[in-house]
Image (cartoon, grey):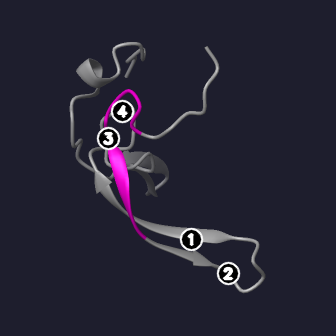
Amino acid sequence: MRKVWQKGDSSEHRRRIKSIRLDCRGSGLLLAVEPMGGACKEGYESCFYREWREGKWVTAEEKVFDPEPVYPEYAFSH
């Protein structure tokens, strides 16, 4: 089945759009959103949960949900 992917289709973790802005050239959009659930299939609010510190990647956030029941088709290897 082919369909357009929409955030939250399987997880029900969606975003509420707070504002939409257009840059001066009309070539870029900036959306400010309010999270309603996690965004990352690893269980974090953001997919950018790792931070480079002292020569290595470290987890910089706490998980906001258990991803296994939300994404049963996703292979959790770490």
Q: Which residue is mark 2?
A: 23
Considering the numbered disc 4 on the image, is that residue within a helix, a strand or a loop? loop
The disc labelled 4 sits on which kind of residue? Glu
Query: Closer to the camera, 50 or 1?
Result: 1
Label 1, label 3: how far apart the Cα atoms are? 20 Å
N-terminal of the two: label 1 or label 3? Answer: 3
User: What is the distance, in whole Å, between disc 3 and disc 4 at their CAs?
Assistant: 13 Å
Q: Any magenta on residue 64?
A: no
| Front: mark 3 or 4 | 3
Question: What secondary structure is marked by label 3?
Answer: loop
- The reply to whether dot 1 and dot 2 touch (C-beta < 8 Å) is yes
> To which quarter of the image does residue 7 belong?
top left
Residue 38 x/y as whole percent = 31, 44
**Which of the two labelled residues, at mark 3 and mark 4, occupies the earlier sequence position?**
3
Q: Quadrant of residue 23?
A: bottom right
Q: Is residue 9 magenta?
A: yes
Q: What residue is rendered at 45% in x and 50% in y?
A: 48
Q: Image point 42% across, 17% down: which residue? A: 74
Q: Which label lies toward us, 1 or 4?
A: 1
Front-most of residues 40 and 5: 5
Q: Mark 1 highlights which residue?
A: 30
Mark 2 burial class by Cα count in 10 Å: few <14, some 14-19, many 20+: few
* Tag 2–tag 3 contact (CB < 8 Å): no
Q: Which amino acid is tagged 3?
A: His
Mark 3, residue position: 13
What's the distance in space between the residues labelled 1 and 2, CA to CA?
8 Å
Residue position for label 4? 42
First in residue order: circle 2 vs circle 3: 3
x then y, percent, for residue 30? 56, 71
Percent coordinates x, y for residue 63 in the rendering? 24, 41
Q: Secondary structure at mark 2?
A: loop
Q: Which residues are magenta?
A: 8-18
